[in-house]
Amino acid sequence: MSPDKKILRLNNIWLTMLLFSLGVLTMPWWLEPIGAAYPDLLQKFAIFGIFAIGYNILFGLTGYLSFGHATFLGVGSYTAVWSFKLLSMNVLPAIVLSMLFAGFFAFLIGYVSLRRSGIYFSILTLAFAQMSYNLAYSVLTPITNGETGLQLSKQDPRIFDRLFFEAGEGLPSTTLFGLDMNGYQGFYFCAVLLIIAFFISLKIFNSPFGLSLRAIKSNQTRMSYTGYHTRPYLMAAFIISGMYAGLAGGLLAVTDPLAGAERMQWTASGEVVLMTILGGVGTLLGPLLGVGIIKYLENIFSSVNSQTLHEFFAFLPDSIVTLVVNFTGLFVGEGWHLTLGLLFMIIVIFLPGGLMQGFEKIKNRFTDKA
Amino acid sequence: MSDNKTTNLMRRRVLKAGVASAMAVGAPIIFSRNAWAEDFRNNPANSKNVVLGFNVPQTGAYADEGADELRAFKLAVKHLNGEGDGGMMNTMKPHKLKGNGILGKKVTYVTGDTQTKSDAARSSAKRMIEKEGVIMFSGGSSSGVAIAVQGLAQEMGIVFMAGLTHSNDTTGKDKRRYGFRHFFNAKMSGSALGPVLKKEMGTDRSAYHLTADYTWGWTQEESIKETTEGLGWKTVKAVKTPVGAGDFSQYITPILNSGADTLILNHYGKDMINSLTQAVQFGLRDKQVNGKTFEIIVPLYSRLMAQGAGENLKGILGTTNWNWALKDTGSQAFVKSFGQEYGFPPSQAAHTCYVQTLLYANACEMAGTFYPPEVIKQLEGFKFDGMGNGATEYRAEDHQCFKDVLVVRGNQNPTSQFDLLEIVQQVPRAQVEYDAKIFGGELGPYKV
């Protein structure tokens, strides 16, 4: 590669990062018109963004379809809440520990699961995830508080906090050195971490390590014949993506200090697969788009009720309003899963490469004409 | 040379990005300062409307209850706004409701699906609070969820009027200043059931518990055990089952050979329908153990479950908070307006949600403000009547309502598809009262 070319690529990375950061940090403004600009949903966008980016490092690059990534999300959450309970309400130890513990779990599960590939790998991860879920749900109740979920309590030791100040009245909230981590501050904290996570993922995609991972996806056997020992590469990718999930789980606890076992359920693992496929597997931005769509449907579509529909269709003549409301009612409220299902089918059938493939097609059409 | 230029360029870009992000971070803090200038969160002072949030399970094991709760909420909103026949607003006393909304503001509402999951429920509640600006939210049908969102209510400073939640913890160790419960609890179920069980089944029985594995199941098992062991019964075994298990046969088979002669089902909603149906299918009720007929007890009953379980429920004992067959004027008024609206009688879940909404609205009227600490002070220790359970009091120490409890039995000869529960005894309030201190917990501060 000539020096000039390298400079161009570097600049490209910085430009991408600049645009990406701007896009993420201005979300409270450009999401306002579609009713998605409130702290809780913005936080979810950022957090699940991190989760999906991490998942994409494994699934997008190596093609290994893990059905158990929610385990690491759950481990991250539980670790973070325990850190709030035992150590301090400061979020830094919580997220560092979340990542470490999730990484450790990823090592254990990966060590066994990565001995197989393809469908066998998927089933193994699914089995581990279900096992962890059941452990969290009933067997490990003293650690996880079962279905009720792990919550903060006034009686928690919080040894580091107690060294510096007295416990206040009521439950403490999570802080970053005095800055409360709820509402918009919480979102910006997650957003900054999302930008860092995206940057790291960008670097991995463009590194020789990323290239090796892609080689595994295209033909693992050939790669082994050329003398590469593939498992350490897979292991590294698995642990990295596990740590991303742990970070996301930790952040869920940071913005809302509660951890429940349902975070580890197989549906949660399936969700991140859906997000990635919806947006575009192996693309940098695709998973984030998928996150946006699914979280938007889940939070906004599910809250639409017949009252809102009646207001929305008020311009129609009375005779058909009820008909229209009844029909559209199937797709909103508790029927939001139906909308998601339809959308997923349409995308998988017409755009197997996800939404990013759609954008590519549109872009090609325009450049062809020009 | 060229390398130097690049680094310069890069440095400039980084600086630019830094400034831009600093601005982006700063701006919303300036915007939200306006919000803090208000005296409390979601103050409806400058709006014509006041928004209430109804957060109920629309999917999952408790979806039937959730749907009925939502119907009741909508009816309560209608009545508060002066539409319809006014329902219990005509029978409640004392009250200051005027039928023109709350404090002259029209009541509107938003809904959400808790999915019977703590995470989803909190996320949905946060949407209501942060985006839709609700001043109070209600709902329930799972104590796990109720406790999770009650904690959120305290953090956010928004009052939570719990719907159907029966765990002792809701107003026990997990009680909160911003959470209120009209529904009764497991402890009260146990106290009410005790004498009836003694009379009908004697003092020499061996009980086997199947318990839903979360806060409600745990506390109900504990309270019922306390009662039955007080009667002299033995507890053979208590097995925890996951919520929404669907198939309970693996838990029921071991009962057959356990030597137990009584099965206590600490299940609710679809779980109870499934476990009871399977227990009957396995022939438990036809068995003779220790020279006694095998009996099943369902400590927490509801008409919706009775509808689901059908024939299998006949003759089975349990307790409920309220039943539509009650003859007092309050219950009758509510059943009438609910029936006119939807064509069938309300469930106990609907009743408690309707009452909670009216109680909150009335507390605002009495306080003359929406400011939560003042509203809370009005609710604490509030005594009222004419809402279906006789004279009722919101105990100030733990925000638990105290009122009569019904012991019911699955009706042997139902006259209609809704006439499924026969009232065995209306247990007076004095018999189910307990000391607020026994469960521990702290309410926390008024002002957050």
Image: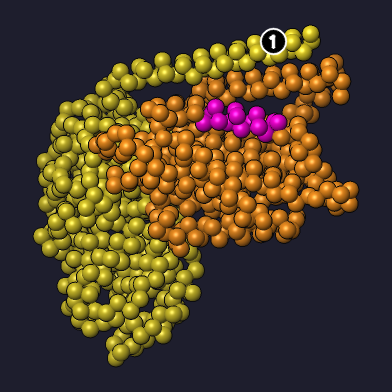
Magenta-drawn segment: A190-203
Q: Which residue is mark 1?
A: B8
Assign the magenta stretch its main secondary structure.
Answer: helix
In the picture provided, is B98 more to the left or to the right than A55?
Answer: left
**Image label count:** 1
Residue at (44, 80) in percent of width and height: B254
Give the amino acid at mark 1. Asn
> Is residue A258 shown left or right of residue B302?
right
Residue at x 74% of width, y 10% of height: B4
Decide: is A99 above or below B184: above
| Category of crowding for the residue at label 1, using alpha-carbon neighbours closer than 10 angstroms: few (below 14), some (14–19), many (at least 20) | few
* Residue B297 visible (yes or no): yes
Location of residue B128 by image quarter: top left
Query: Which of these two is toward me, B373 or A91?
Result: A91
Residue at position x 31%, y 39% in the image: A162
Q: Measured along the vertical axis of the image, is residue B379 above or below residue B321?
A: above
Q: Quadrant of residue B423?
A: bottom left
**Residue at far bottom of view:** B291
Relative to B436, A314 lies left or right: right
In the image, residue B170 lies at what x, y percent? Answer: 28, 51
Give the drawing colour for chain A: orange
In the rendered image, the quadrant that contains the N terminus of chain A is top right
Residue A97 located within the stretch drawn in magenta: no
Chain that appears yellow: B
Position of A199 relative to A243 (above/below): above
Q: Quadrant of the C terminus of chain A?
A: top right
